[in-house]
Image (spheres, rainbow, N blue to C red):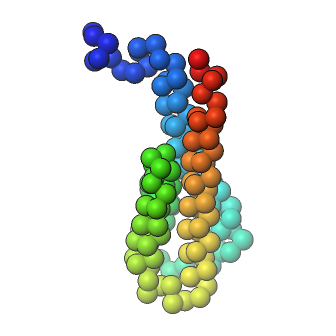
Amino acid sequence: MTKEKQAFWLDGDKMNFIESVLYILGFTIAVFGGCFVVKEILKKFEIEEEEKGFKGAGKTIGMIERAMVTIFIYSGEFNAIVLIFGVKSIARFSELQDRKFGEYYLIGTLSSLLFAIIIGIIIKWVISNFWYLYS
């Protein structure tokens, strides 16, 4: 196998391997760890929801949301995060008229976005500030 065809972690470049592991670790923490963080935050503000949607859809939407935010942070596309908030707000527009639901929605969405942003920024910072550890 020629060097051009090898996976980056096989060519002896320790930096790429460690970077990749850190990106994957951060992504995993943001997506799956965010479920627990947001759930704990929302426990304080539980409202009685009517069964309108699919069971577990909110959790899945949150995971997709955090995955997208983490990818946007990693790629430096901070402005694209607004897209997620906008799409979610449009989808829930009629339900946001109820004050309790609106506040619950904002707390859940903002805590989810904030968690993913913080994890993404921490991983980017670690990678950019500790490059010398890899050499």
Residue 57 in view in this figure: no
Quadrant showing the C terminus: top right
Kindly identify the residue that appears in the image at 40 percent across and 76 percent down: 91
Kindly identify the residue that appears in the image at 61 percent across and 80 percent down: 103
Image quadrant where residue 94 sits: bottom left
Q: Is residue 54 above or below residue 89?
A: above
Front residue of 108/120: it is: 120
Front residue of 129/82: it is: 129
Q: Is residue 66 above or below residue 75?
A: below
Kindly identify the residue that appears in the image at 47 percent across and 50 percent down: 76
Front residue of 46/92: it is: 92
Quadrant showing the N terminus: top left
Count of marks, rendered view: 0
Q: Is residue 18 above or below residue 40?
A: above
- Seen in the image, is 41 located left or right of residue 35? right
Residue 66 in percent (x, y) is at: 50, 55
Kindly identify the residue that appears in the image at 62 percent across and 72 percent down: 107
Q: Residue furthest right?
A: 44
Q: Is residue 126 above or below residue 117?
A: above
Residue 31 in percent (x, y) is at: 53, 50
Front residue of 130/89: it is: 130
Residue 53 in percent (x, y) is at: 42, 73
Residue 54 in percent (x, y) is at: 41, 68
